[in-house]
Image: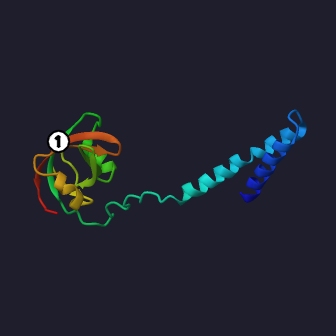
Amino acid sequence: MLALLTLAVAGLVIRQLAPNPSTLRDIGTLLLVLWLPAVGNLVAYFVRKIPRRPRPLGGGFGAASVFTPHLRVRLEPTGLVADLPAALAAAGNNCTLIVGNSGFSARVGGALQQQDGDVAVELLRPEVALPQLAAGTEFRLLVGATAAAKGRVIEVTRGA
């Protein structure tokens, strides 16, 4: 970077001392333009130093983890998924509960026997989700990226 800036300063000096219509002045102009990549490199250096947002907690529910219900909910399919129990089973019973602008990772207990009905739900982070999922709260249930059902919390079976 120092070399590019030195060449740019040399180009400025050449441009100032050379006669106006000359090849030497044009070379000075070209050298003067070398400050652009130097500044671009400097900006890129500082951008790399900006701390990034922390990544969301990964992992989700462990394959061998025991199902611990936090909620009992009633689901009604939206019609966007042909078979809600099959869609949930294909996703490993994992889903997302959307309340307003907040989403909470969850999984349903066991397999649904019918398209709509009461199911037990386990939350990945109950300490965060339960304050917003009181009895009577309406939500949307996403399986993958599809709004597969709408629902209502019937009861909170385990407190935070």
Q: Is residue 157 left or right of residue 148?
A: left
Of helix, strand and loop, which one carries label 1? loop
For the C terminus, the image quarter is bottom left
* Dot 1 crowding, Cα within 10 Å, few <14, some 14–19, many 20+: some
| 56 up-or-down from 25: above or below | below
Q: Is residue 96 left or right of residue 54?
A: left
Q: Disc 1 residue type?
A: Asp
Identify the residue at image location x=10%, y=53%. 155
Identify the residue at image location x=11%, y=59%. 157
Residue 26 visible in image: yes
Q: Is residue 37 left or right of residue 46?
A: right
Task: Report x, y in % for residue 94.
Answer: 30, 53
Task: Report x, y in % for residue 99.
Answer: 22, 45
Q: Is residue 3 left or right of residue 76?
A: right
Front one among 105 and 62: 105
Task: Report x, y in % for residue 53.
Answer: 42, 57
Identify the residue at image location x=29%, y=34%. 80
Front one among 90 and 62: 62
Query: Which image quarter: residue 21?
Result: top right
Front one among 133 and 77: 133
Residue 109 visible in image: no
- The image shows a total of numbered marks equal to 1
Query: Which image quarter: residue 101?
Result: top left
How did the renderer colour the structure? rainbow
Q: Which residue is mark 1?
A: 116
| 60 up-or-down from 99: above or below | below
Task: Report x, y in % for residue 11.
Answer: 80, 47
Front one among 6 and 102: 6
Query: Which image quarter: residue 149?
Result: top left
Identify the residue at image location x=76%, y=57%. 3
For the N terminus, the image quarter is bottom right
